[in-house]
Image: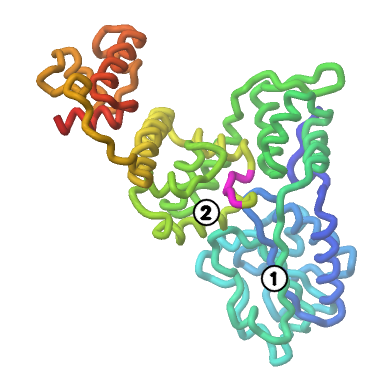
Amino acid sequence: MNTLLAHEVPLYGRERELALIREVLEHGRGGGAVVLSVEGMPGIGKTRLLTEAADLARRLGYVPPRGPHGHGARTHRPAAALTGRRVGSPSPGPRLVIVDDPRAAPGRPPVPARAVGPRGRSGTGRDVWLIAHRPGEAPPLPAALLAHPAVRTERLSLGPLARADTHRLAHDVLGAPPARSLSSLVDRAGGHPRLVIDLLTGLREENGVRLSGGEVELLTERLPARLSSRVRETLERYSPVCRQLLCVAAVLGDEVVYGDLALMTRTSVSALLPTLEEVYATGAVRNVGTRAVFQSPLLRRLIAESVPASVRLALEQEAAALRPVHRAQQHPAPARPAPPAADRPARRGELSERQRGLVALVAEGLTSQQIASRLALSPHTVNYHLRKLFKLYGVSSRIELLRAARSN
């Protein structure tokens, strides 16, 4: 049951994408210049697809470059032999240039604009560029090349794998089919190849799975450190405000509620629009009808767990406190006649010393458990006194209690 490396796992579920790449390579063999941008969220399989494209190009007669390109080329087997070249070097056949990681040379395009001649030809005119484009990155090629009328440009967007392809991938990584409990966890990856590979590889490394009866069983609910590290590294690629929104949204649940995000960041949904565009560009969030949800429950959990537990608790409490206040502001209750004197809420002076202390601790944002620890009481007793205070003031929530206590 050997764990396979990512580039050794067969490529599943990309038949449509490979058909377009083959068509582009055939176009290059016919003398055309082509730029194909392979787009998708981190880990969705861009590098793996480019590796397959390099193998296909070799079989179609593409000539390996004679010199290193020097900008943005990743040494990834077997694409390395065809990745990066000096534009204009003599070559008898079509040439493929793969740029897998433009971040390797920030601010330096991998080919000068003058490399494209008057008929859109660079060198002998049969160059095909395959570019991995990640969310939030600028195009790695100069605008002059991309806008040239004789250069064909194509975009290829990679989405999640189908469930059947995801399970075939899991079988190959593990060397045996996953049992039901592990299959359910694999499904929560939402068809994301890198999440599946890191999940299963990490579980193997940490003895979180075992082979039993011809299937691989899950032994732990804890996610492997390898997977958590991968997600943290990916989050670091995004802007601070984008990370903030993703983390807050992940803590609050699977659905991304724009109103809640605006409340938590003390702003408006319209002011969040530029950052929300970046959030969507990451691929972590997608639209389902009128709702916005995380691409996969596993990814949401990993993003949420990247936030310290104490901060997660504080965010949940803050959201719980803000939501009813916001609803009350949006839908104020109709005015009611003043109650008879006997039913009026208690005045501040009418509270006992213990009740005043309890109100003060509620104002600090403490939970019933925390208040109980502070006062050396049981949580049941704390809740009993809170209910009495709610009745005294004629309110039904802690927020209303604080507002009533301040006004008296």
As drawn, 41 above or below 320: below
On the image, numbered disc 2 is attached to which residue?
279
Q: Residue at x 65, y 69 (%)?
A: 69
User: Magenta segment, which residues?
Assistant: 290-295
The three-letter amino acid code for the residue at tag 1 is Arg
Q: Which x, y percent locates residue 72? A: 61, 63
Q: In the rendering, which numbered label is found on residue 85?
A: 1
Q: Residue at x 61, y 29 (%)?
A: 224
Q: Is residue 345 magenta?
A: no
Q: Does any portion of residue 64 appear in the rendered image?
A: yes
As drawn, 4 above or below 42: above
Quadrant position of residue 32: bottom right
Q: Is residue 291 magenta?
A: yes
Taking 145 as reference, is 64 left or right? right
Q: Residue at x 33, y 14 (%)?
A: 383
Residue with the most extreme left position: 349
Quadrant position of residue 168: top right
Q: Which x, y percent locates residue 385? A: 28, 13
Dot 1: within a 10 Å radius of its alpha carbon, few (fewer than 14), some, or many (20 or more) residues? many
Quarter holding the N terminus is top right
Q: Does any portion of residue 311 appear in the rendered image?
A: no
As drawn, 200 above or below 350: below
